[in-house]
Amino acid sequence: MKQFPDNKKPARSGRGFTLIEVLVAMTIIAVGVSALVASAGASVFRADYLRDREFGRWIASNRLAELQSLPAWPDNGTTNTEVEMVGLDWFVRTRTQAVSDDDLRRVDVEVRRDKDEDSYIYTVSGFIGNPAIKE
C-alpha cells in the first residue's frame, strides 16, 4: 500500500464537475428562471389592468362632467351607454337618484369592459345641482 504524507492528498486525475454538481446547478438556474418568467407575466397583467383602470377613470370622469354641464336634470334611474376610446368599446352604467336635498341628485358612473360583466373597472360618484338655480 502506498503511503502519502499527511499534508498531501492524491490528485484527481480529471478536472471538472461531477454529474451531481451539474444537475444541482441546472436545478438552481431553472428555479430562478421560472421565478423571473412568473414575475414578468404578473407585471404584464398588472400593467394591462392599470391601463384599463386609467381609461375607465377618464371615461367615468368625462361622463360625470358631461351630466353636470347639461342645462337640465338627468332622469332618475339607470342608463347604459357604450363609449369608444383608444379603439376599444367601453360600457358605462349611470345611476341617477334623488337625495334628501331637493336641489341635488346623486350620480354614480360605472365603467366596464364587457357589457354583461358584474364588476366594474372604475366608478365615480358625484352630485348634480339643480340647473334652475345655477347662475
Image (tube, rainbow, N blue to C red):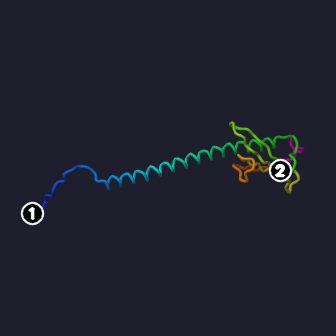
Which residue is under mark 1?
Answer: 1
User: Dot 2 surroundings within 10 Å: few (below 14), some, or many (20 or more)?
Assistant: few
User: Of helix, strand and loop, which one carries label 2?
Assistant: strand
Residue at the top extreme of this rendering:
87
Q: Where is residue 120 in the image (x, y as percent from the top left)?
A: 71, 51
Locate residue 127 relative to residue 50 in the image: left or right.
right
Q: Do the residues labelled 1 and 2 touch (CB within 8 Å)?
A: no
Of labels 1 and 2, the one closer to you: 1
Query: What is the total number of numbered labels drawn onto the structure image?
Result: 2
Mark 1 belongs to which amino acid? Met
Which residue is under mark 2?
Answer: 78
Locate residue 74 relative to residue 31 in the image: left or right.
right
Residue 87 figure quarter = top right
Q: In this view, does 42 lie above or below 70?
A: below
Q: Quarter of the image containing the C terminus? A: top right
Q: Nearer the viewer, residue 25 or 111?
A: 25
Residue 65 figure quarter = top right
Locate residue 32 relative to residue 105 in the image: left or right.
left
> In the image, is residue 40 part of the stretch drawn in magenta?
no
At 75% from the left and 45% from the top, the residue drawn is 91
At 9% from the left and 63% from the top, the residue drawn is 1
In space, the residues marked 1 and 2 are separated at their CA atoms by 98 Å
At 70% from the left and 45% from the top, the residue drawn is 56
User: Magenta residues?
Assistant: 127-135
